[in-house]
Image (tube, rainbow, N blue to C red):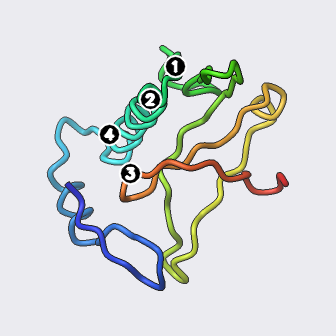
Amino acid sequence: MFTVGTVDGRTEKKAQDIQEMKSNSHDGHNFDDHLGSCNEHRAIVEFLSQGCEVFKNVRQHGPIDIIVIHPDGKEERLDVKTRAYRKRDKLPIHRSLTEKQKKLDVRIYYIDANYDGHRHPPKGVK
């Protein structure tokens, strides 16, 4: 579990806990890959708990992580990202969509350190 602290009203993971988790990674697996996979599943559970239908991409890499169909029939194509913050100013890093993702109308869905999910327009999209 992460230790969560607050800086200027924003939550962030304590570097010490993250470093410890990274050093405990084994088999050459990257900690960030594990965290990303866990957060994809957290997003899936969140949408399922809202009564949505959720479909997960079976490929390891692809333009869409999950497709969500809401109870009202609205469909979303989402790329799930773990929220990251810049070291220098603690501001959130906003990811950009690839050209393929833009064509497929993919939206980015961020998971924070406290596991709250939210949508935010990617860099350059209003």
Residue drawn where x is 47% and y is 75% of the image:
10
Mark 3 / mark 1, whichever is N-terminal:
1
> Would you name the residue on which mark 4 appears?
34
What residue type is disc 3 on?
Tyr
Task: Pick the residue in front: 69 or 39.
Answer: 69
Mark pair 3, 1: CA separation: 18 Å
Instruction: Point out the tag, 4 or 2, that comes first from the N-terminus.
Output: 4
Q: Which one is in front in this view, the residue at disc 1 or the one at disc 4?
A: 1
Instruction: Look at discs 3 and 4 and give the one toward the viewer.
Output: 3
Badge 1, how many Cα within 10 Å: few under 14, some, many 20+? some
Q: Are marks 1 and 2 in contact (CB under 8 Å)?
A: yes
Q: Which residue is mark 2?
A: 44
Q: Earlier in the sequence, mark 1 or mark 4?
A: 4
Tell me how far mark 3 sits from mark 4, CA to CA: 15 Å
Q: Badge 2: few (under 14), some or many (20 or more) residues near its Cα, within 10 Å?
A: many
Per the image, the residue denoted by label 1 is 54
Q: State how far apart marks 1 and 2 are (Cα).
A: 7 Å
Q: Residue at x 50, y 18 (%)?
A: 56
Residue on which the image places disc 3? 115
Q: Is residue 33 above or below residue 44?
A: below
Q: Is residue 14 left or right of residue 87?
A: left
Q: Secondary structure at mark 4?
A: helix
How far is the residue under mark 3 from the one under mark 2?
Answer: 12 Å
Which residue sits at x=62%, y=26%?
Answer: 64
**Which SS class for mark 3?**
loop
Q: Earlier in the sequence, mark 1 or mark 2?
A: 2
Determine the residue positioned at 49% across, 48% down: 117
- Cβ–Cβ under 8 Å for marks 1 and 4: no
Badge 3: how crowded within 10 Å, few (<14), some, or many (20+)?
some
Q: Amino acid at mark 4?
A: His
